[in-house]
Image: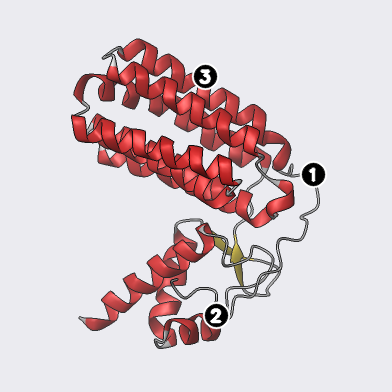
Amino acid sequence: RRPPRYREAAYAAIKEAILAGRLAGGEPLVEERIAAALGISRTPVREALAILEHEGLIAPRYGKGLFIRELTREEFMEMFTANEVIEPYLARRAAWHATDDHLTQLQAAIDRGRQAAADVNIYESLRSGRDFHYWLGTAAGNARLTEFVVHNEEQADLYLISLGNDQILSSTHMEASNREHQNILDAIRARDPEAAARFIIVHGQSLRERWIPLFRSLAQDVGPGMAVSASASVAPT
């Protein structure tokens, strides 16, 4: 049973490295380099990459290997439209069912987002958003819908990360998300399901307005991503 454990470890390490900006969107994910960085054989790395490809987080490009998958503006809109249908339901349920621990975890995610905005740390800001939406779904008590929402968040975040620091979120944008998350949490604390649903709809609409300019249209050419070495950067730090 050792290979599945290595595969799961490789999957987690590769995904974390991408979401933390240590693997670039503009260069291929090379099995040999990743395996050497993790100190394991190529087989579990190949299996981990296959899982990430199946999840739609990476994809082949021009026959040159696997890269972080680039979302189009149309796909981004579809994902966030889907989230806007689901998340008001989760917010209402969270207002009814959130425990003290859920409220603590939600506030902690916001606080990490505020620190990330102060530090202008894009990766931690995006991570805090994913954590917030995860704990919102957890508080609502629906693991399947939570997984769906967080997966969409990850896909959008991976694309934003692949653009490079100079093209994505400003500290003003980060703090706007923090304020919107706080409004949602305050409504949940007040046990006001309709206010929680309303604030999460506003949050989704605001995100679309802030992020749409960053996503290419189907009619546009694909631009280059960041140039960060994929040789050793996958190793956990």
Q: Amino acid at mark 3?
A: Val
Q: Secondary structure at mark 1?
A: loop
Q: Position of residue 151 (x, y in %)?
A: 43, 47
Q: Secondary structure at mark 2?
A: loop
Task: Give the residue number, with chain letter if any, for mark 2.
Answer: 232
The residue lying toward the viewer, choosing from 82 and 175, is: 175
- Residue under the point 39% across and 86% down: 40
The CA span between labels 3 and 2 is 41 Å
From the image, state whether disc 2 or disc 1 is nearer to you: 2
Task: Give the residue number, with chain letter if any, for mark 3.
Answer: 202
Q: Amino acid at mark 2?
A: Ala
Q: Quadrant of the C terminus?
A: bottom left
Residue 145 visible in the current orientation: no
Task: Give the residue number, with chain letter if any, for mark 1.
Answer: 219
Q: Position of residue 17 (x, y in %)?
A: 50, 65
Q: How is the structure coloured here?
A: secondary structure
Q: Secondary structure at mark 3?
A: helix
Dot 3, how many residues are within 10 Å of its Cα: few (below 14), some (14-19), or many (20+)? few
Of pointers 3 and 2, the one earlier in the residue sequence: 3
